[in-house]
Amino acid sequence: MTRLLSVVGARPNFMKIAPLVEELKKFPDVEHCLVHSGQHYDELLSGNFFADLGLPTPDINLQVGSGSHAVQTAEIMKRLEPVLLDYEPQMVVVVGDVNSTIAAALTAVKLGIDVAHVEAGLRSFDLTMPEEINRKLTDAISSLLFVTEQSGIDNLKHEGVPAERIFLVGNVMIDCLLRHREAAAQSAILGRLGMCLNGSGYRPYGVLTLHRPSNVDDPKTLESILHAANVLAMKIPFFFPIHPRTRKNLESFGLTRYFAGPESGGVGIVPLDPLGYLEFLSLNDQARIVLTDSGGVQEETTALGVPCLTLRESTERPVTVEHGSNQVVGVNPDRILAAAQSIIENPLRASRRPPLWDGHAATRIVAILRGYLQPRCSA
């Protein structure tokens, strides 16, 4: 029996682990333990996603909660170590680039347990991003590195990682999207927001998401983004599902004045509570344009063919730019407006997906994991 233990902690992790959990069910010779660190513990950020994705209740919830990067990382390590000592997995699987990712990888390696990193090799080359630090350190100590795009392979080879540890497998986020796209289309979200037309089709609208500290912790930066979005929202409504941290800052900075009121006539920036996975997928799928600072949203809009503007100065997912659906525009309002107005006036949906973004990344990953571990388990 092969024992795997995977660790998730934040909302993006859940979409990445769901296809792997489903694929592992096919193999009775693999015992799998799913651990939730509790990094995201709010029901809107965590619980609803498990239901939408059909994920089982985690075998173990470490219930870490919020805290500074140091406190959160240390607490995950402290609580995970006895779990690993008791379960004795042959490998720990980590996904993405959150604090739970690096904390689990460090804990496992220090106990002599191999680590597999799903979504390895992505680089923004911006060490002010906590995620960049987590990515680089996790890759450095992982035995197997599963890569979503060619840039990841190039980055890892440049950093001296042996080629036999690197595998281009595709994107489990897109596995998840393709598996749930039809169910998302049945969501009532667009009707509830008044976007459904009589007959068929939808009114044009945009989507805005913001959560990066560099964007939401600085009042000037946050206001400049909202100013640009507000100008655009004079033409079509922009729906803004708001992360709890972002909402707190919007209120403390006095920036909720940018939100549309009941007299707006169906346009403006429309604030929403965080959405479940299926609702958010439905909202993005029919959008005219998406403005975001999220790496995962860049990937999802690329798969959907929806034009996306990335509100950062760099992206760790250059394949989304190469395939034409994503533009990196930064936070300057003039740049945002110029790019967005062109898209709104000339709507075109991209049709190409990156190589291996075909819905079968989890199948490839599990095959490689079993091939790697079975000889070690029988030795």
Image (spheres, grey):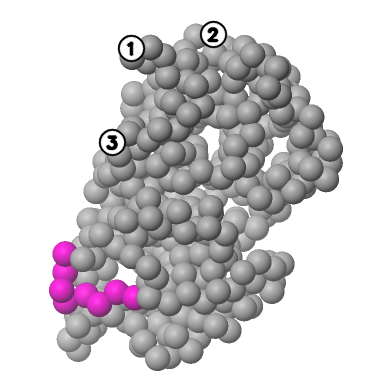
Magenta residue span: 26-33
Question: Mark 2 and mark 3: span between their CA atoms?
Answer: 28 Å
- For label 2, the crowd category at 10 Å Cα-Cα, with few meaning under 14, some 14 to 19 and many 20 or more, is few
Residue 165: quadrant of the picture: bottom left
Q: Secondary structure at mark 1?
A: loop
Residue beneath disc 2: 345
Q: Name the front one of labels 2 and 3.
A: 3
Mark 1 and mark 3: Cα distance apart in space: 19 Å
The N terminus lies in which quarter of the figure? bottom left
Q: Which quadrant would residue 144 be assigned to in this image?
A: bottom left
376 or 289: nearer the viewer: 289
Q: Nearer the viewer, mark 1 or mark 3?
A: 1
- Closer to the chain start, of discs 2 and 3, is 3
Sequence order check, earlier mark of 1 and 2: 1
Q: Amino acid at mark 1?
A: Gly
* Pointers 1 and 3 in contact (C-beta within 8 Å): no
Give the number of the disc on residue 182: 3
- The structure residue drawn at horizontal position 45% and vertical position 33%, both measured from the top left corner, is 189
Image position, residue 204 (x, y; %): 49, 16
Residue 97 visible at all: no
